[in-house]
Image (cartoon, coloured by chain):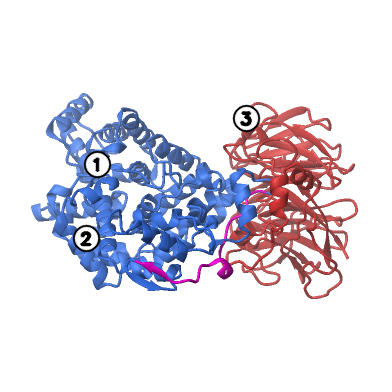
Amino acid sequence: MGEGWGEGEYPMTTQTKFQLKPVTTVGFVADQGGRGFHLPTDFVIRSDGRIFVASRSNTTALDIVGIQMATIDHEFFGQIGGYGSAPGQMIWPSALAMDRDENLYLGDDFLQRITVYDREGKVQTTWGTKGTADGEFDGVSGLLFDQDDNMLLVDHRNHRIQKLTKDGQFLDKWGSHGDGDGQFNLPWGITQAPDGHIYVADWRNDRIQKFTSDGEFVAKFGTSGDGDGQFNRPSGLAVDSEGNMYVADWMNQRIQVLDPEGGFIQKIRGNAILGAWAVEYLEANADELEARSKFVPIFDTDTEDPGETSARIEPYFWDPIRVALDDQERVYILETGRHRFQVYEKA
Amino acid sequence: MTTVHEKQDVALTAHLLRRAGFGATPDELDHYMGMSYEDAVEELLAKKASVDIPHDLIRRYHVEQSDLRNGQAAGAHWVFRMVNTDAVLNEKMCLFWHRIFATAATKLIQARMVTNQVDMFREYGMGSFRDLLIQLSRDPAMLMWLDNQDNHMDSINENYGREILELFSMGVGNYTEEDIKECSRAFTGWRVVNPDYMSIKMRNNTARPYGYIAWQFEYDDEDHDHEDKTFLGETGDFNGEDVVDIICRQPATARFIARHLYHFFVADELPVPQWPHFDPIDPEAIEIMSQAYFDSGYDISAMLRAMFNSDFFKSEASRFARIKSPAEMVVGTLRLAGPTDLPSTDTYAAAGACAAMGQGLLNPPSVEGWQGGSEWINTGAYVQRVNFASRVLNDPDKPGIRDMIDRIAERSGGQPMSPEQVVDACLDILGPLPVVESTRAGLIDYASKWGDMSFPDPDTDRHIVTLIQLIVTTQEYQTA
């Protein structure tokens, strides 16, 4: 196709320890159905490499609301669930996680509930009650199964994390509204490092907080801003076996890589290429393919707004919302605005 | 005790806020009654769009308002801002320019571009008309809407060159067909980045492969016609900016914009296509505003100041003489109910209601925009209006309604109020709204079945909500 990055063309910053380099791009706007995603909000990678992507879609494309399944090799396996409030359906899918038995858990911010699907995608159960009491929640925005196979639920409008059993029984909680250590302001994504520490994207406090597996505050990283190591509404992150953090710096429209102490390593604005689904589409639409031969994807924009810049520059991240690592510690970054994920690896 | 003089002041300030804003909530009326009328005008002119619109929350909860691709999301996005802003005149001016420089998301496919155009109106819509016309001519939505990406040095496309004269600045009868050609030549090379690919994505209505790509203005000097042009009697190697300068110097431009302002803010004029054939309703008003235009160096705020401070605007005859546009009615009603919490589907319902009443935001029916006036009202639209207002003002615990009930309770002085007193208090707090006597009598008759009403009392709360719902069905509530 003549598009993509050349050797050394991806953005590099201070050489510290390692850099991420792009591997591939998987996705396609499925606003009219078919293969791809539409305004995805979360994803999870199963042990066999199958990727489950929750598409929120919009009011004019409700058929695409659901959980699509794909792989990094551009295989596509269709969709679980659909739009609605019946068991197995969803309105505002907001969070995904997988337990040790590889059952899939979906959080729905509109229906205020958790839906559980088995490994084959069949609905097992649905539970959840809106509220502030123990075990109740208001706006599930992140889900995680910890190393003990308990659920950690980001109960974001209650500004807390709750630890629940798989069937929703309350075990523990931590956090309250505020900007002190261990407090939250509308937290979003959550992850657990291989060493057991829990990390939370403390969204409206523009920081990452690190906790023990029992919720004891350990450290915080980042301040408000767009400088190196600063954040503007971080939405999710992943942490590798060395403790390096890969943060979706959502409103700065970039990924930041930080070392275990929070030291800045790298920032990435995005380097998407045309993935296999995109290539196939263009090859089947000769007029668009021809026009695209003169297309200059990256140009100087006349706006200071990172979001507007992302709207104009197709290869850049547009609303990078979640980060996850596969078993090779390749870094997958899901973008709501571009209906795809970009994959990077250490170099 | 309220004096006659104070009542007149309240009525005048409420009139100003219906026209320069979306009608006054009791808090807004209190605020502006704390200053002179002239100072109120100045504050309305000075207030710019708040920076405290919570874009982060909006985008987090309503993800489709981040890419703003579909019209429903973009309409809801604008409704949220109109309902929650304190810079009401700034928003009204966005509606004003949206009606004149009518650009529709249907052809452009991505409503985001029209939203960006409205953002531009928010920034430039109350300043120099020259600056605004330059920005409009560079606006990617306008360039694609009127095909200027097909306006080349060796083959002009006259679409934008025609409309900037006919619909956006001077009006029919003030230029020739030759002027249109020369104007178009001046705008050759004004296009968007990647014009071929952007055009074909628009033509094919496809977001594939990775969603729409927002457009950016680009000037291609190699595609610009550098030969001399003769435009409105002046000759030179004119580019787009030069043409705009010449347009802005024309008395016809001042009169055209003044008549539009009069049509939008003072009284419903004839439909725009009839303007070349009929004099304005109030030629003197047009002259006053035109003079302000030239005296100020084409400043729109100066025209607004002259208009709001004039006798023709303040006169009793002009009050409640305009039919509210759907957006004015919907937004004003939502503002009465109180601020919008996020996440909320109310803004989507409101944008849908505007469309059902004939004013799909970001989606005008044609380049001529909406005619307005009596065309806003037909049987179906009236039912939509009444149903919407009644549905929104349905809950005594909505903050705006609670505030109105509390204010009525305060007036009671701790004593029970008669049905007549409660009806009058409701009419007063909703405007004040001077309904015809038969309507008032009907309301009192309806309320009499409740007898005297005490405070605090949940039954009284419900009765007041019912009265408010009845009052917003009246003809008077549909006028501004």
- A275 part of magenta stretch: no
Label 1 chain ID: B
Q: Which residues are magenta?
A: B211-231
Q: Residue furthest top?
A: B449
Name the disc covering residue A181, or none.
Answer: none
Q: Residue furthest left?
A: B4
- Name the residue beneath numbered marker 2: B307
Residue at image position (29%, 41%) is B405
Residue at image position (83%, 69%) is A8
Q: Colour of chain B?
A: blue
Q: Colour of chain A?
A: red
The x, y position of residue A251, in whole percent, is 62, 60
Q: For this view, does A306 lie left or right of residue A323?
A: left
- Name the residue beneath numbered marker 3: A84
Q: Tell me the SS state at disc 3.
A: loop
Q: Quadrant of the C terminus of chain B?
A: top left
Q: Tell me the SS state at disc 1.
A: loop
Q: For this view, does B98 lie left or right of residue A184?
A: left
Q: Nearer the viewer, residue A43 or A172?
A: A43
Q: Nearer the viewer, residue A226 or B67?
A: B67
The x, y position of residue B320, in whole percent, is 20, 44
The x, y position of residue A174, in whole percent, is 68, 52
Label 3 chain ID: A
Indicate which label's residue lies in the foreground, 3 or 2.
2
Q: Nearer the viewer, residue B265 or A180?
A: B265
- Name the residue beneath numbered marker 1: B479
Q: Amino acid at mark 2?
A: Met
Q: Tell me the SS state at disc 2.
A: helix
Task: Establish whether labels 1 and 2 are both on one chain.
Answer: yes
